[in-house]
Image (cartoon, grey):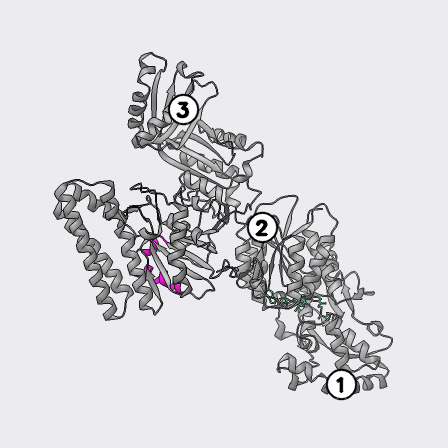
């Protein structure tokens, strides 16, 4: 689904930054798919950042190494292989022969230059970081050229933009970082004019420029950084990183099969995870967004409709203090020990300085408060170098035996748990350590930052899998995004349909006096939805209700997303909600949305009769699905609005009674009409009045045709064991044939034409000393609904206005049937009935 097609914001033009990773550009089919995504109609303008085709950066590195070794044949062979691969993609994406020939010529020139460069390095047998970067940037440059050519071939206006002129950097070859302010100026100056002309800029990722015009790379995976830098500079509406994963996950699913996609992460959490080894995101990618609030979406390239993970300033999923964990394998634990460290300032600083000078990155540091030892983790392959660097830095202390020495333990892994909710929540560390000890995992070292955003431990590498599973289970991360977390003090409501009943319900809910008040987290209409996992505020709800009353669409309101009801429910269902309930107050065929809700473990409350009056096989399969997922289906208001019809039926059956027959009047609209016409009021005027009071269905012909009563009759009859469908119900329609299929406005404009016929119908009944009632008759074998002239002495004759009457003939109530009477239509009684169903699901 495309739930995150947010409405365009007030900036002009609203911008989407798309970044396609290498796996998303693996071959011609993938590039074509990327082009489709770029060209999809949307209200925003798209800036595209591309990585090199999958595996190309590694191939370029191999060429660089062959060149350094002076192996010209290997260089030639590898360059030819790459050239063929790019040519195959070009042929696969460009149909037009002339355009294709031009592109292939461009590729030939680019690869000839690469070959010459390789030969130059091979002759010198020297590969400086500058030359290495100069060689590596070609991967992204080539893929950007391919994408531009593909867009042009599709008739789009697209332009290649050289990243070196956009991304100004600190000039560190192999791992440059952008000068954000200078880059802001360049990006705006170069890209905004293109976007205003509706040109699609395509920028090679991973590449930047030095002040003297040289090309640098931003470190492996640096295309993410290019995308966030551009998003920041352009104040984009959002940045989408199209990846070969479904989103950011609670942990590596290869380690823990129950890992889940985290629907939303705070920027700080995502940054922490990236730092601690979650490979999905470049560790520095979020730095440009520290002050500029542009949300980043990590979405699966293979399934563009899936929502993936939103990374933004929001803090949701607050019931999960820990949202994810990461494991970094192949670590060495370096420990510096000695009494000479006690109270001596600067030991830690000298330790880090020594490692920094050796170019060794430290993933974790821990120092005991006794200051007797300091330990840190470094990549295993750098452990020996780290020892040498430290021995050199502390040579004097070692010779004086003030330090005992440097110990390097190989075969270690770090496990870090991350979550904003850890701050100020006591007991997280204890839960983590207890789960590890229960799983038999020994903790070698521990580190926790004072931000309380993460706790990291060092463990033996062979324990990594068991440890990850234990911690994942402890924090119930297999439930994240599944709507499954059950809490005693919350009930989250998703309201589908914001019409008369829906809006009345929104007015009633805040007045509920209960320890646990239902929280509305989402509203869905035909256009799309709004969703706030922590609950929409009273002010937001009032403003949405007002806008809906004036005919607005949720998709175009603040915070609105486009999508069908089923897509909306599926998206909402990926979030961690407490006892989620879908309330269906539409008058539509909503089975797909209800099924999606059940799959997300939601309970269902329905005022809508259509899902339960659908063909029998569909209803049975719905009930089976609900039973399988433990979802409850409550639908008191589908018959008799707020009257306790379903409740009474259930009580009879639960106490061992058997319902034999149900009769009565269950149309508030028809009851009201017949009462009013009986008073001498014209049919047309009475019907308009019923509509304005909210008694009728959205199309009042559903009431007049008897179909609304037929649906109610079918729902009741099926409860008694009736095996048929709506077509098996005998229905008398009160809508003349000529008026049945005309558009609603025309039907309403010609209502008065039916006044005389209705008056005659009435006069005939009165003449016989009878009154007209629209009557339902249901048994396990037969269901019929129609207009009956009943004697004045009949119990139904006494009904007034919207009064419904439901008569249960049962084994116990055979002589004197059980009768329920009262108003059976109207927003107030119906919304109250729906609310009553919701409260049944709410902890008291
Ligand atoms: N009015 C009454 O007295 C009673 C009504 N009901 C039932 O309550 C339901 C709602 O009735 P009203 O509020 O009067 O109707 P309404 O027409 O005022 O409201 C229904 C709303 O649902 C929206 N909608 C339609 N299809 C949708 C979809 N697929 N996804 C999301 N939203 C969708 C419509 O745009 C509309 O805003 C109906 O099914 C009706 O039969 C039940 C008992 C009594
Ligand atoms: N339109 C219906 C509303 C309740 O289901 C009626 O009039 O009874």
Q: x, y percentage for residue 799? A: 82, 71
Q: x, y percentage for residue 136? A: 26, 48
Q: Which residue is mark 3?
A: 348
Q: Is residue 41 left or right of residue 7?
A: left
Q: Is residue 30 above or below residue 722?
A: above
Around disc 3, counting alpha carbons within 10 Å, would you say few (fewer than 14), some (14 to 19), or many (20 or more)?
some
Per the image, label 2 sits on a secondary structure element best described as loop
Q: Is residue 301 visible?
A: no
Upstream in sequence: badge 3 or badge 1? 3
| Start-end of magenta stretch | 20-39
Q: Is residue 343 visible?
A: yes
Q: x, y percentage for residue 820? A: 79, 64
Q: Nearer the viewer, mark 3 or mark 1?
A: 3
Residue shown at 40%/14% (left/top)?
Answer: 340
- 3D distance between C-alphas at marks 2 and 3: 43 Å
Q: Nearer the viewer, mark 2 or mark 3?
A: 3
Q: Which residue is mark 1?
A: 755
- 3D distance between C-alphas at marks 3 and 1: 94 Å
Q: Is residue 564 left or right of residue 771?
A: left
Q: Is residue 324 left or right of residue 815?
A: left
Around disc 1, counting alpha carbons within 10 Å, would you say few (fewer than 14), some (14 to 19), or many (20 or more)?
some
Residue 38 counted in the magenta span: yes
Q: x, y percentage for residue 270? A: 46, 43
Per the image, label 1 sits on a secondary structure element best described as helix
Q: Which residue is mark 2?
A: 533
Per the image, label 3 sits on a secondary structure element best described as helix
Q: Is residue 796 left or right of residue 324?
A: right
Upstream in sequence: badge 1 or badge 2? 2
């Amino acid at each position: 689904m495309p739930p995150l097609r947010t409405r365009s914001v007030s900036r002009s033009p609203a911008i989407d930054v798309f970044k396609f990773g290498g796996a998303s550009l693996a071959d011609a089919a993938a590039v074509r798919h990327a082009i489709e995504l770029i060209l999809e109609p949307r209200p925003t303008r798209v800036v595209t950042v591309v990585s090199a085709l999958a595996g190309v950066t590694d191939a370029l590195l191999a060429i660089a190494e062959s060149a350094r070794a002076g192996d010209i044949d290997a260089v030639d062979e590898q360059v030819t292989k790459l050239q063929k691969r790019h040519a195959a993609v070009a042929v696969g994406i460009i149909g037009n022969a002339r355009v294709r020939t031009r592109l292939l010529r461009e590729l030939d020139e680019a690869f000839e230059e690469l070959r010459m460069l390789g030969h130059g390095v091979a002759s010198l047998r020297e590969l400086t970081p500058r030359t290495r970067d100069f060689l590596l940037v070609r991967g992204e440059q080539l893929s950007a050229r391919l994408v531009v050519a593909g867009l042009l071939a599709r008739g789009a206006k697209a332009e290649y933009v050289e990243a070196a002129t956009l991304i100004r950097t600190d000039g560190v070859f192999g791992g440059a970082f952008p000068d954000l302010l200078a880059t802001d100026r360049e990006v705006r100056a170069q890209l905004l004019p293109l976007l205003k002309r509706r040109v699609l800029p395509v920028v090679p990722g991973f590449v930047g420029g030095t002040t003297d015009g040289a090309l640098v790379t931003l470190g492996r995976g640096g295309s993410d950084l290019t995308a966030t830098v551009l998003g920041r500079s352009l104040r984009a509406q959002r940045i989408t990183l199209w990846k070969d994963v479904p989103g950011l996950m609670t942990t590596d699913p290869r380690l823990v099969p129950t890992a889940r996609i985290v629907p939303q992460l705070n920027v700080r959490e995502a940054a922490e995870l990236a730092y601690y080894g979650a490979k999905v995101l470049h560790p520095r990618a979020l730095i440009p967004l520290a002050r500029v609030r542009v949300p980043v979406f990590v979405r699966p390239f293979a399934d563009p409709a899936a929502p993936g993970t939103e990374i933004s300033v929001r803090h949701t999923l607050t019931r999960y203090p820990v949202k994810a964990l990461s494991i970094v394998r192949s670590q060495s634990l370096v420990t510096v020990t000695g009494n000479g460290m006690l109270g001596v300032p600067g030991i830690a600083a000298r330790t880090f300085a020594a490692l920094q000078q050796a170019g060794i990155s430290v993933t974790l540091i821990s120092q005991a408060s006794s200051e007797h030892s300091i330990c840190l983790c470094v990549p295993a392959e750098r452990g020996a170098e780290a020892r040498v660097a430290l021995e050199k830095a502390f040579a004097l202390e070692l010779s004086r035996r003030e330090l005992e020495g440097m110990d390097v333990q190989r075969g270690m892994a770090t496990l870090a748990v991350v979550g904003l909710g850890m701050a100020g929540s006591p007991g997280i560390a204890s839960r983590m350590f207890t789960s590890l000890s229960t799983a038999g995992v020994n903790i070698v070292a521990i580190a926790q930052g004072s931000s309380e955003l993460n706790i990291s431990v060092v463990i033996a590498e062979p324990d990594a899998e068991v440890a990850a599973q234990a911690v994942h289970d402890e924090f119930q991360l297999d439930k994240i995004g599944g709507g499954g977390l059950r809490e005693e003090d919350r009930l989250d409501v998703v309201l589908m349909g914001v019409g008369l009943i829906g809006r009345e319900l929104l007015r009633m809910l805040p007045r509920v006096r209960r320890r646990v008040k239902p929280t509305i987290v989402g509203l869905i209409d035909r256009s799309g939805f709004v969703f706030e996992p922590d609950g929409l505020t009273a002010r937001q709800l009032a403003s949405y209700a007002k806008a809906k009353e004036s005919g607005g669409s949720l998709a175009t309101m603040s915070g609105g997303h486009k999508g069908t009801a089923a897509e909306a429910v599926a998206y909402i269902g990926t979030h961690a909600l407490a006892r989620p309930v879908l309330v269906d107050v539409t008058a539509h065929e909503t089975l797909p949305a209800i099924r999606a809700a059940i799959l997300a473990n939601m309970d269902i409350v329905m005022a809508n009769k259509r899902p339960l009056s659908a063909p029998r096989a569909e209803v049975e399969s719905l009930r089976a699905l609900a039973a399988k997922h433990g979802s409850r289906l409550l639908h008191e208001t589908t018959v008799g609005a707020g009257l306790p019809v379903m409740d009474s039926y259930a009580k009879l059956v639960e106490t061992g009674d058997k319902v034999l027959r149900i009769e009565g009047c269950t149309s508030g609209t028809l009851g009201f009409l017949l009462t009013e016409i009986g008073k001498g009021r014209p049919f047309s005027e009475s019907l308009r009045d019923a509509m304005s009071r909210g008694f009728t269905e959205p199309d009042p012909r559903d009431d007049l045709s008897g179909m609304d009563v037929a649906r109610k009759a079918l729902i009741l009859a099926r409860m008694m064991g009736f095996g048929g469908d709506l077509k098996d119900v005998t229905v008398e329609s009160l809508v003349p044939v000529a008026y049945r299929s005309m558009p609603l406005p025309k039907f309403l404009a010609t209502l008065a034409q039916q006044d005389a016929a209705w008056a005659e119908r009435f006069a005939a009944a009165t003449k016989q000393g009878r009154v007209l009632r629209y009557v339902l008759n249901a048994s396990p074998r037969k269901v019929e609904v129609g207009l009956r002239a009943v004697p004045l002495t009949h119990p139904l004759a006494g009904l007034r206005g919207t009064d419904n009457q439901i008569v249960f003939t049962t084994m116990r109530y055979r002589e004197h049937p059980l009768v329920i009477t009262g108003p059976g239509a109207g927003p107030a009684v119906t919304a109250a009935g729906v609310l009553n169903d919701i409260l049944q699901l709410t902890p008291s």
